[in-house]
Amino acid sequence: MPRRALLGATLLLVTVVPAPAAAPADASPLAVTRRTLDGSNAIVRGTGDRKQKLLALSDLLRDFLDTEALARLAAGKHLEGRSPEETAEFLRLFRELFIRTYVQRLLLFDAPEFAYGEEHVHGDSATVGTEIITPRDRFAVDYTFRRTPDGWRATDILVEQVSLAQNFRAQFDSALAKDSFQGLLERLRKKVSGPADAG
């Protein structure tokens, strides 16, 4: 697989690596990350068909990733002036599409190895450095977290210094330069209503 394609798939991979069970609320960001990455490999390498693994990963992802924070970062100015109903629908659609798409991409990999770097905590925010190791390459992956009542949740992921939230923002900027916000919602609705195991 070419490096660019692998990097793109890796970007998808690292956002959907849930733990086998929710980490304790007092677990450190590094512990949450390690539990999550190890848990993803257990699911991918375990028994069950593709659909079962998709469901397991989707359920467990909800304990790791703060999709609302990611959605707000990605949408940026485009949520300004929207009604509460429009905002709520966007956040819901983004969450469902994000989880479905990225969990599916996880199954493209044969469970890579992970190396864990340093954890830096500053009040209610934190970063954790990791590496994804494949037979052909290594990728630096940094997670940003925020502290919530339920524990640390990932709000952005940087692969080789490329921000996932900024990547989404560029896509939304491009789409909304050509269409209305309602048009974007309609496109998201169609994608979310499609088959759950569609590639």
Image: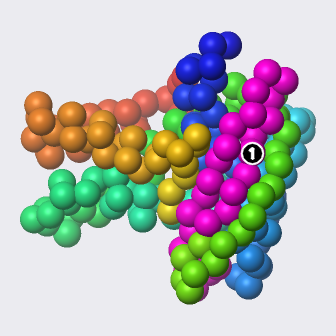
- What residue range appears in magenta? 127-152
Give above or below for 100 relative to 120: above
Q: How many marks?
A: 1
Give above or below for 60 relative to 11: below
Q: Kindly indicate the quadrant of the structure image that contains residue 88.
A: bottom left
Q: Is residue 86 visible?
A: no
Q: Residue 116, how many percent across, how many down?
A: 80, 55
Residue at screen point 75% across, 40% down: 132
Describe residue 19's horizontal placement relative to residue 176 as left or right.
Answer: right
Q: Residue 144, how many percent across, how many down?
A: 56, 63
- The question of residue 131 being in magenta is answered with yes
Q: Amino acid at mark 1?
A: Glu
Residue farthest toward the top in the current orientation of the protein: 1
Q: Is residue 7 visible?
A: yes
Q: Residue 105, how many percent across, how many down?
A: 62, 31
Describe residue 180's horizontal placement relative to residue 119 as left or right.
Answer: left
Q: Looking at the image, which is closer to me, 166 or 52?
A: 166
- The question of residue 141 being in magenta is answered with yes
Label 1 belongs to which residue? 131
Describe residue 130's horizontal placement relative to residue 70 as left or right.
Answer: right
